Amino acid sequence: VRGLRVAHETGIAVTINDIDPSAAAEIRANAEQIGGAIEVTCQDANALMSTRRFDAVDLDPFGTPAPFVDASCRSAKRYLFVTATDTAPLCGAHLKAGMRRYFARPMNTEYHGEVGLRILLGFVAREMIKYDRGIEPLFCFAHEHFVRLHLRTRPRVKNADQALDRIGYVMQCTGCFYREERTGLLSESGVCPCCGTALRPIGPLWLGAVNDPDTLLAMEALLPEMTLGTASYLRRLLPVLRDELPTSTFYDYHRIAKTLRASPPAIDIVLERLRGGGYLATRTHYEGTGIRTDAPLAAIEAAITDRA
């Protein structure tokens, strides 16, 4: 459907592939009704992407995109878009499946949706880096039961090296809410400074920003001109993404309040208390009770309980 819409609404020439002959026949019939430069192929996606290059590749398979990422990295000239619906393996609910598919160790934390997005993004980055190319995240988000990445490819070794510098780990304490970020392909052991519990590595994954503010602003400006069924959702989503701090995790302040046996105040109150303490703090799109901040855990707890 997405390929047909792109062809119909923009006039861009597209190639739509499906390995299922009946599905390809349906696509071809719809393409004939729409008209325009629509090529429909019926073959293994890896074979297609290994023999042809496209300005943009939109990878949207059933389930995991992992078997197709390598070929898509070679095929995409300028843009690579990836959808994953296997959120349970990505987010740590099915640990071994996530490790097999993405060569990373997830963890089912309170920020598991972000873990899934960053593990997928880190996996795509590592596949692209093999070919001396980097990536630039433009518009990445998690919603319901899928993760969606919109990436710009960046040729040249220096861009691959810059992407490599964004690969690392979140070191999560299993005894409390403390976590820290560490760059590098190899994780090192550590101990939680708050409770003394060993830190467990999550990753390798992508650290830092996953969206480009200029791209999001341009999308917001175009929204009034578009007729979209998801327009109301995008109007809510885009400003939140644009304002999100580029931290690699968020805190569910309701969960923290529960462990403190405190009644959680409104999220805006917590954010204002953190900002009043000199810290940066924003909402996050992953969770309505999630906050992103550069404040230490003790300051977050104080903001929740209103301890000076």
Image (spheres, helix red, strand yellow):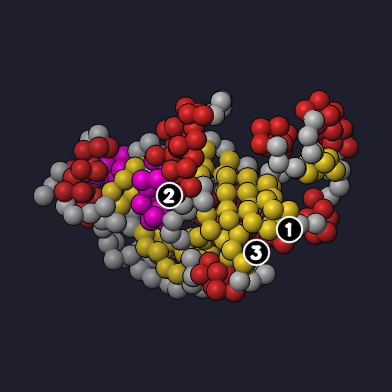
Front disc: 3 or 1: 1
Could you tell me which residue is drawn at 72 percent across and 62 percent down?
A: 74
Which sits in the foreground, 204 or 284? 284
Q: Is residue 64 visible?
A: no
Say which element carries label 3: helix
- Could you tell which of marks 3 and 1 lies nearer the N-terminus? 1
- The percent coordinates of residue 8 (x first, y second) are 71, 32
Above/below status of 228 relative to 182? above
> Who's the residue at 86% across and 43% down the image?
42
State the residue in front, 189 or 296.
296
Residue bearing the label numbered 3: 127
Q: What residue type is labelled 3?
A: Glu
Contact flag, marks 2 and 1 (Cβ < 8 Å) = no
**Distance between the Cα atoms at labels 2 and 1?**
27 Å
Dot 1: what SS? helix
Give the Cα distance between marks 3 and 1. Answer: 12 Å
Residue under the point 51% across and 47% down: 139
Q: How crowded is mark 3: few (under 14 residues within 10 Å), some or many (20 or more)?
A: some
Q: Position of residue 7 (x, y in %)?
A: 72, 36
- Say whether disc 2 or disc 1 marks the residue closer to the N-terminus: 1
Above or below: residue 56 compared with residue 16: below
User: Which segment is the magenta one?
Assistant: 240-260
As helix, strand or loop, the secondary structure at mark 2 comes to helix
Question: How many numbered callouts?
Answer: 3
**Residue 264 percent location from the top left of the image:** 25, 36
Q: Residue 293 carries which label?
A: none
Query: Which amino acid does the dot numbered 2 rest on?
Result: Pro
Q: Name the residue carrying label 1.
A: 75
**Residue under numbered circle 2:** 213
- For discs 3 and 2, the disc positioned in front in the rendered view: 2
- Please name the amino acid that badge 1 sits on: Ser
